[in-house]
Image (cartoon, helix red, strand yellow):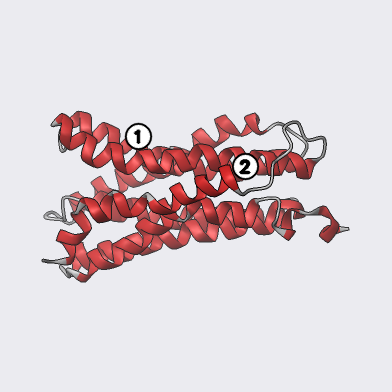
Amino acid sequence: MTWQDIYASELQAVWALQVVPLLYLAWRALLAAPVEWRPATVEGRLAWFVDRYAIVFALETILDPLATTPLLNALGIAGQPAGTAVMIAFVLLGDFRVYLLVFALLALAAGQTWRVALPRAAAWTLLVPAIAVPLDAALRVAAPGRDPNSIWLVYESVFTLVALGLRTRLAGAPPLVRDALRAVLAYVALYYALWASSDVLIQLLGLDAGWLLRIVPNQLYYAFWIPFVVWRCGKRNPQMNTENHR
């Protein structure tokens, strides 16, 4: 059995990605301290948003691998245009969750409602595809015979640069959220850079070990995203406490 076989197995591609989100939801339901429903302070609104965000996207994280692997196979549309559309929708949703977190926390820290971040997050979600798709097409013309999945290497590389660039722009963000969001974007750049590195090994060098490496960013993207966000952006994070900025 190769690492590619292991990577493609449902154990790795579906079930191993479910454990941490399920544990988080169980912890949130049974052990987490309650979050104020209508908080009056900025800190309270930040904590409230992160809490609800974590619940929604923990559920989305559980649904994503279920919908894009066993469900598509069961419906017989895996590899078909409809199946590809479902996969692309979840890719874009996974990117949208990053921008929503960033721009919603910036809006809340500025005294606005988190909802003003929705159109901005949606627009930013389209940025990487708008760059990656024509860039990959141009590279295919310049270098015929590229790997059929080369779009993913281009996409991952572009997103890594976008995440790092956005992180740099946050240098002037409100101190209440700046460090937490810079940590989040560094985390995003890390899993996209690891995906790109694994695709270099697979597509350019033909190394089966690239599939082993690819398991790591999968866990970071699916399993550990919500725990990381709650740890860095939740109410227990000292960076989200104004007492540290007085």
Judge from the rendering whether residue 163 lies leftward or rightward of residue 130; answer left or right: right
| Real-space CA distance between mark 1 and mark 2, rounded to the nearest whole angstrom | 24 Å
Q: Quadrant of residue 192?
A: bottom left
Helix, strand or loop for disc 1: helix
Q: Residues within 10 Å of mark 1 (few under 14, many from 20)?
A: some
Q: Quadrant of residue 105?
A: top right
Residue marked by disc 2: 51
Judge from the rendering whether residue 10 lies leftward or rightward of residue 197; answer left or right: left
Query: For the point 63% across and 29% down, which residue is it?
Result: 115
Q: Amino acid at mark 2?
A: Asp
User: Looking at the image, which residue sits at the far front?
Assistant: 30
Q: Is residue 165 visible?
A: no
Residue 141 coordinates in the image, percent (x, y): 18, 49
Q: Are marks 1 and 2 in contact (CB under 8 Å)?
A: no
Q: Nearer the viewer, residue 145 or 216?
A: 216
Residue 146 coordinates in the image, percent (x, y): 16, 56
Residue 57 coordinates in the image, percent (x, y): 49, 40
Q: Amino acid at mark 1?
A: Ala
Residue 228 coordinates in the image, percent (x, y): 54, 56
Q: Which quadrant would the C terminus be assigned to in this image?
A: bottom right
Residue marked by disc 1: 89
Q: Is residue 76 visible?
A: yes
